[in-house]
Amino acid sequence: MIEMLPRLLLRGLPDLPDLGGVFHSMVSGGFSWYHLIPGVADDSLVPGMLQRGETYVIFAAWTGCAVVVALAWLAKRGLDRARARGGVDALVPDAGFTPRNVLEILTEALFDLAESSMGRKDAKIFFPFLGALFLYILVNNLLGLVPGFLPATSCVSNNLALAALVFLTFNAAGLWRNGFGYVKHLGGPILVMVPFFFLIESIGLFVRPVSLTLRLAGNMFGDHTVFGIMSDLVPWGLPSILLGLGAFVSFIQALVFMLLTTVYISLAVADLDHH
Protein backbone atom coordinates (compact mmCIF):
# COMPACT_ATOMS: atom_id res chain seq x y z
CA MET A 1 0.00 0.00 0.00
CA ILE A 2 2.80 2.41 0.88
CA GLU A 3 4.67 1.71 -2.35
CA MET A 4 1.53 2.63 -4.34
CA LEU A 5 1.46 6.17 -2.90
CA PRO A 6 3.27 7.84 -5.82
CA ARG A 7 0.97 6.15 -8.32
CA LEU A 8 -2.14 7.17 -6.39
CA LEU A 9 -0.98 10.78 -6.15
CA LEU A 10 -0.30 10.90 -9.88
CA ARG A 11 -3.57 9.23 -10.90
CA GLY A 12 -5.59 11.38 -13.26
CA LEU A 13 -2.74 13.67 -14.32
CA PRO A 14 -2.71 14.12 -18.12
CA ASP A 15 0.02 13.24 -20.60
CA LEU A 16 1.97 10.94 -18.32
CA PRO A 17 3.72 7.88 -19.79
CA ASP A 18 2.60 4.40 -18.90
CA LEU A 19 4.85 4.18 -15.86
CA GLY A 20 3.20 1.03 -14.63
CA GLY A 21 4.57 -0.93 -17.56
CA VAL A 22 8.08 0.41 -17.47
CA PHE A 23 9.59 -2.34 -15.36
CA HIS A 24 8.44 -5.43 -17.14
CA SER A 25 9.36 -7.80 -14.32
CA MET A 26 9.43 -7.86 -10.52
CA VAL A 27 13.20 -7.53 -10.60
CA SER A 28 12.92 -3.84 -11.39
CA GLY A 29 10.76 -3.25 -8.33
CA GLY A 30 7.92 -1.10 -9.78
CA PHE A 31 7.29 2.64 -10.06
CA SER A 32 9.35 5.25 -8.26
CA TRP A 33 9.76 9.03 -8.24
CA TYR A 34 12.81 8.59 -10.47
CA HIS A 35 10.46 7.79 -13.36
CA LEU A 36 9.34 11.41 -13.46
CA ILE A 37 12.82 12.32 -14.74
CA PRO A 38 12.78 12.51 -18.56
CA GLY A 39 14.47 9.55 -20.15
CA VAL A 40 14.19 7.24 -17.14
CA ALA A 41 10.77 5.74 -17.82
CA ASP A 42 11.62 4.69 -21.38
CA ASP A 43 15.35 4.06 -20.81
CA SER A 44 16.25 6.65 -23.44
CA LEU A 45 18.57 8.61 -21.12
CA VAL A 46 21.47 6.15 -21.32
CA PRO A 47 20.67 3.83 -24.23
CA GLY A 48 22.72 0.65 -24.29
CA MET A 49 24.55 1.29 -21.01
CA LEU A 50 22.15 -0.57 -18.70
CA GLN A 51 19.62 -3.34 -19.00
CA ARG A 52 16.07 -2.36 -19.77
CA GLY A 53 14.37 -0.81 -16.75
CA GLU A 54 17.59 -0.04 -14.88
CA THR A 55 18.08 3.63 -15.77
CA TYR A 56 16.69 4.57 -12.36
CA VAL A 57 19.77 3.00 -10.74
CA ILE A 58 21.93 5.97 -11.74
CA PHE A 59 19.74 8.39 -9.81
CA ALA A 60 19.17 5.97 -6.94
CA ALA A 61 22.92 5.55 -6.50
CA TRP A 62 23.54 9.31 -6.56
CA THR A 63 20.70 9.82 -4.10
CA GLY A 64 22.42 7.39 -1.74
CA CYS A 65 25.73 9.21 -2.18
CA ALA A 66 24.05 12.55 -1.46
CA VAL A 67 22.54 11.21 1.76
CA VAL A 68 25.91 9.83 2.91
CA VAL A 69 27.64 13.14 2.19
CA ALA A 70 24.90 15.06 4.00
CA LEU A 71 25.18 12.83 7.07
CA ALA A 72 28.96 13.19 7.08
CA TRP A 73 28.66 16.98 6.80
CA LEU A 74 26.18 17.16 9.70
CA ALA A 75 28.39 14.93 11.84
CA LYS A 76 31.46 17.03 10.98
CA ARG A 77 29.62 20.20 11.99
CA GLY A 78 28.76 18.68 15.36
CA LEU A 79 32.36 17.60 15.85
CA ASP A 80 33.67 21.05 14.92
CA ARG A 81 31.32 22.69 17.43
CA ALA A 82 32.58 20.36 20.14
CA ARG A 83 36.22 21.08 19.29
CA ALA A 84 35.51 24.81 19.35
CA ARG A 85 34.47 24.53 23.00
CA GLY A 86 37.93 23.23 23.84
CA GLY A 87 39.12 21.36 26.91
CA VAL A 88 37.12 18.46 28.30
CA ASP A 89 33.95 19.78 26.65
CA ALA A 90 35.41 18.84 23.27
CA LEU A 91 35.15 15.18 24.27
CA VAL A 92 31.59 15.34 25.60
CA PRO A 93 29.01 13.83 23.21
CA ASP A 94 26.12 15.92 22.00
CA ALA A 95 22.83 15.73 23.83
CA GLY A 96 20.30 13.61 22.04
CA PHE A 97 20.20 11.49 18.91
CA THR A 98 22.44 13.60 16.65
CA PRO A 99 24.29 12.61 13.45
CA ARG A 100 27.59 13.11 15.26
CA ASN A 101 26.68 10.70 18.06
CA VAL A 102 25.25 8.08 15.72
CA LEU A 103 28.18 8.11 13.31
CA GLU A 104 30.78 8.16 16.11
CA ILE A 105 29.23 5.06 17.71
CA LEU A 106 28.87 3.35 14.34
CA THR A 107 32.39 4.23 13.25
CA GLU A 108 33.93 2.96 16.47
CA ALA A 109 32.02 -0.33 16.28
CA LEU A 110 32.91 -0.91 12.63
CA PHE A 111 36.56 -0.02 13.20
CA ASP A 112 36.75 -2.53 16.05
CA LEU A 113 35.40 -5.22 13.72
CA ALA A 114 37.96 -4.34 11.05
CA GLU A 115 40.76 -4.23 13.63
CA SER A 116 39.87 -7.70 14.93
CA SER A 117 40.23 -9.10 11.41
CA MET A 118 43.29 -7.32 9.99
CA GLY A 119 45.01 -5.64 12.92
CA ARG A 120 45.11 -1.99 13.91
CA LYS A 121 47.76 -0.94 11.38
CA ASP A 122 45.90 -2.26 8.34
CA ALA A 123 42.53 -1.22 9.75
CA LYS A 124 43.69 2.40 9.80
CA ILE A 125 44.73 2.11 6.16
CA PHE A 126 41.65 0.40 4.75
CA PHE A 127 38.87 1.54 7.08
CA PRO A 128 37.96 4.67 5.06
CA PHE A 129 37.19 2.39 2.12
CA LEU A 130 35.38 -0.18 4.27
CA GLY A 131 33.35 2.45 6.11
CA ALA A 132 32.35 4.18 2.88
CA LEU A 133 31.18 0.84 1.44
CA PHE A 134 29.09 0.13 4.54
CA LEU A 135 27.43 3.56 4.64
CA TYR A 136 26.68 3.61 0.91
CA ILE A 137 25.11 0.15 0.97
CA LEU A 138 23.19 0.79 4.20
CA VAL A 139 21.72 4.08 3.00
CA ASN A 140 20.69 2.59 -0.35
CA ASN A 141 19.14 -0.41 1.39
CA LEU A 142 17.13 1.82 3.70
CA LEU A 143 16.02 4.09 0.85
CA GLY A 144 14.21 1.08 -0.57
CA LEU A 145 11.87 1.23 2.44
CA VAL A 146 10.85 4.83 1.67
CA PRO A 147 7.69 5.17 -0.45
CA GLY A 148 8.49 6.00 -4.04
CA PHE A 149 12.17 5.07 -3.90
CA LEU A 150 13.88 2.01 -5.31
CA PRO A 151 17.16 0.78 -3.80
CA ALA A 152 20.17 0.78 -6.10
CA THR A 153 21.44 -2.25 -4.16
CA SER A 154 18.62 -4.45 -5.48
CA CYS A 155 20.12 -4.04 -8.97
CA VAL A 156 22.84 -6.44 -10.10
CA SER A 157 24.71 -3.82 -12.15
CA ASN A 158 25.16 -1.50 -9.14
CA ASN A 159 26.33 -4.30 -6.87
CA LEU A 160 28.62 -5.69 -9.54
CA ALA A 161 30.34 -2.29 -9.72
CA LEU A 162 30.83 -2.35 -5.94
CA ALA A 163 32.12 -5.92 -6.05
CA ALA A 164 34.50 -5.06 -8.90
CA LEU A 165 35.88 -2.21 -6.79
CA VAL A 166 36.40 -4.65 -3.91
CA PHE A 167 38.08 -7.12 -6.28
CA LEU A 168 40.52 -4.48 -7.53
CA THR A 169 41.18 -3.24 -4.00
CA PHE A 170 42.11 -6.51 -2.33
CA ASN A 171 44.23 -7.65 -5.29
CA ALA A 172 46.01 -4.30 -5.43
CA ALA A 173 46.56 -4.50 -1.67
CA GLY A 174 48.00 -8.00 -2.01
CA LEU A 175 50.41 -6.91 -4.75
CA TRP A 176 51.35 -3.78 -2.79
CA ARG A 177 52.12 -5.72 0.36
CA ASN A 178 53.62 -8.95 -1.04
CA GLY A 179 54.70 -8.06 -4.56
CA PHE A 180 55.06 -10.97 -6.99
CA GLY A 181 54.79 -13.32 -4.03
CA TYR A 182 51.05 -12.64 -4.04
CA VAL A 183 50.75 -14.11 -7.53
CA LYS A 184 53.28 -16.86 -6.82
CA HIS A 185 51.27 -17.89 -3.76
CA LEU A 186 48.32 -18.77 -6.01
CA GLY A 187 50.37 -21.57 -7.55
CA GLY A 188 50.76 -23.48 -4.31
CA PRO A 189 53.88 -25.10 -2.84
CA ILE A 190 54.24 -28.05 -5.27
CA LEU A 191 55.90 -27.18 -8.58
CA VAL A 192 54.21 -29.86 -10.70
CA MET A 193 50.79 -28.82 -9.37
CA VAL A 194 51.25 -25.10 -10.05
CA PRO A 195 48.94 -24.94 -13.12
CA PHE A 196 46.17 -26.80 -11.28
CA PHE A 197 46.42 -24.78 -8.07
CA PHE A 198 46.72 -21.50 -9.97
CA LEU A 199 43.54 -22.28 -11.90
CA ILE A 200 41.62 -23.21 -8.76
CA GLU A 201 42.83 -20.19 -6.80
CA SER A 202 42.10 -17.84 -9.71
CA ILE A 203 38.56 -19.17 -9.99
CA GLY A 204 38.17 -18.65 -6.25
CA LEU A 205 39.29 -15.03 -6.58
CA PHE A 206 36.82 -14.29 -9.38
CA VAL A 207 33.98 -16.03 -7.54
CA ARG A 208 34.28 -13.55 -4.66
CA PRO A 209 32.88 -10.49 -6.50
CA VAL A 210 30.16 -12.63 -8.07
CA SER A 211 29.18 -13.91 -4.64
CA LEU A 212 29.15 -10.38 -3.19
CA THR A 213 26.99 -9.16 -6.08
CA LEU A 214 24.38 -11.89 -6.02
CA ARG A 215 24.15 -12.07 -2.22
CA LEU A 216 23.39 -8.39 -1.82
CA ALA A 217 21.09 -8.11 -4.84
CA GLY A 218 19.18 -11.28 -3.98
CA ASN A 219 18.64 -10.43 -0.34
CA MET A 220 17.57 -6.85 -0.96
CA PHE A 221 15.32 -7.79 -3.85
CA GLY A 222 13.68 -10.50 -1.77
CA ASP A 223 13.29 -8.35 1.33
CA HIS A 224 11.73 -5.38 -0.47
CA THR A 225 9.55 -7.60 -2.66
CA VAL A 226 8.10 -9.35 0.38
CA PHE A 227 7.55 -5.98 2.05
CA GLY A 228 5.69 -4.67 -1.00
CA ILE A 229 3.51 -7.77 -1.39
CA MET A 230 2.58 -7.98 2.27
CA SER A 231 1.84 -4.24 2.37
CA ASP A 232 -0.68 -4.73 -0.43
CA LEU A 233 -2.27 -7.80 1.16
CA VAL A 234 -2.41 -6.50 4.74
CA PRO A 235 -2.18 -2.67 4.60
CA TRP A 236 -2.57 -2.14 8.37
CA GLY A 237 -0.31 -3.28 11.21
CA LEU A 238 1.80 -5.92 9.47
CA PRO A 239 3.76 -3.46 7.26
CA SER A 240 5.03 -1.74 10.42
CA ILE A 241 6.52 -5.02 11.63
CA LEU A 242 7.97 -5.77 8.20
CA LEU A 243 9.40 -2.26 8.06
CA GLY A 244 11.44 -2.96 11.19
CA LEU A 245 12.50 -6.32 9.78
CA GLY A 246 13.46 -4.65 6.50
CA ALA A 247 15.61 -2.10 8.34
CA PHE A 248 17.33 -4.93 10.22
CA VAL A 249 18.00 -6.88 7.00
CA SER A 250 19.30 -3.70 5.37
CA PHE A 251 21.81 -3.24 8.18
CA ILE A 252 22.88 -6.89 8.22
CA GLN A 253 23.48 -7.01 4.47
CA ALA A 254 25.60 -3.87 4.57
CA LEU A 255 27.57 -5.33 7.48
CA VAL A 256 28.08 -8.69 5.73
CA PHE A 257 29.35 -6.97 2.58
CA MET A 258 31.81 -4.93 4.61
CA LEU A 259 33.00 -7.88 6.72
CA LEU A 260 33.59 -10.08 3.66
CA THR A 261 35.55 -7.25 2.06
CA THR A 262 37.58 -6.95 5.26
CA VAL A 263 38.36 -10.67 5.19
CA TYR A 264 39.39 -10.58 1.53
CA ILE A 265 41.75 -7.66 2.13
CA SER A 266 43.22 -9.22 5.28
CA LEU A 267 43.90 -12.46 3.39
CA ALA A 268 45.55 -10.55 0.55
CA VAL A 269 47.89 -8.54 2.79
CA ALA A 270 48.73 -11.41 5.15
CA ASP A 271 52.33 -12.50 5.55
CA LEU A 272 52.60 -15.28 2.99
CA ASP A 273 55.66 -16.78 4.70
CA HIS A 274 53.35 -18.29 7.30
CA HIS A 275 51.17 -20.07 4.71
Image: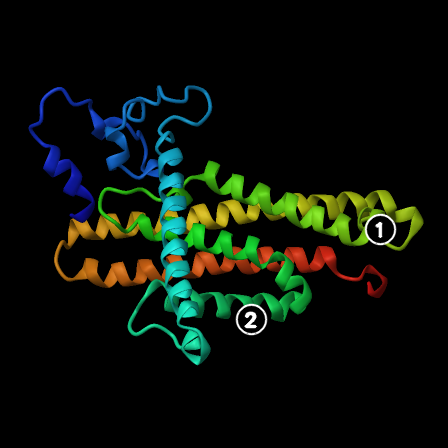
The residue closer to the viewer here, 172 or 104, is 104
Whichever of callouts 1 and 2 sits on the residue coming sooner in the sequence is: 2
Expressed as whole percent of the image width and height from the top left, the position of residue 235 reads: 13, 54
Disc sitting over residue 167 in the figure:
none
The residue closer to the viewer here, 47 or 225, is 47
Residue under the image location 57 percent in, 57 percent down: 260
Q: What element carries label 2?
A: helix
Q: What element carries label 1?
A: helix
Task: Look at mark 2 in the image and give the residue it sits on.
Answer: 112
What's the residue type where badge 1 is placed? Gly
13 sits to left or right of 262: left
Expressed as whole percent of the image width and height from the top left, the position of residue 73 reads: 39, 54
**27 shown above or below 126:** above
Query: How crowded is the residue under tag 2: few (<14 C-alpha within 10 Å), some, or many (20+)?
Result: some
Query: Which dot, 1 or 2, sits closer to the camera?
Result: 2
Expressed as whole percent of the image width and height from the top left, the position of residue 194 reads: 87, 46
Considering every residue shown, the one lying at the far left of the view is 12
106 sits to left or right of 232: right
What's the residue type where badge 2 is placed? Asp
144 sits to left or right of 267: left
Residue under the image location 36 percent in, 35 percent down: 59
Q: Quadrant of the C terminus?
A: bottom right
**115 shown above or below 195:** below
**215 shown above or below 31:** below
Disc sitting over residue 181 in the figure:
1
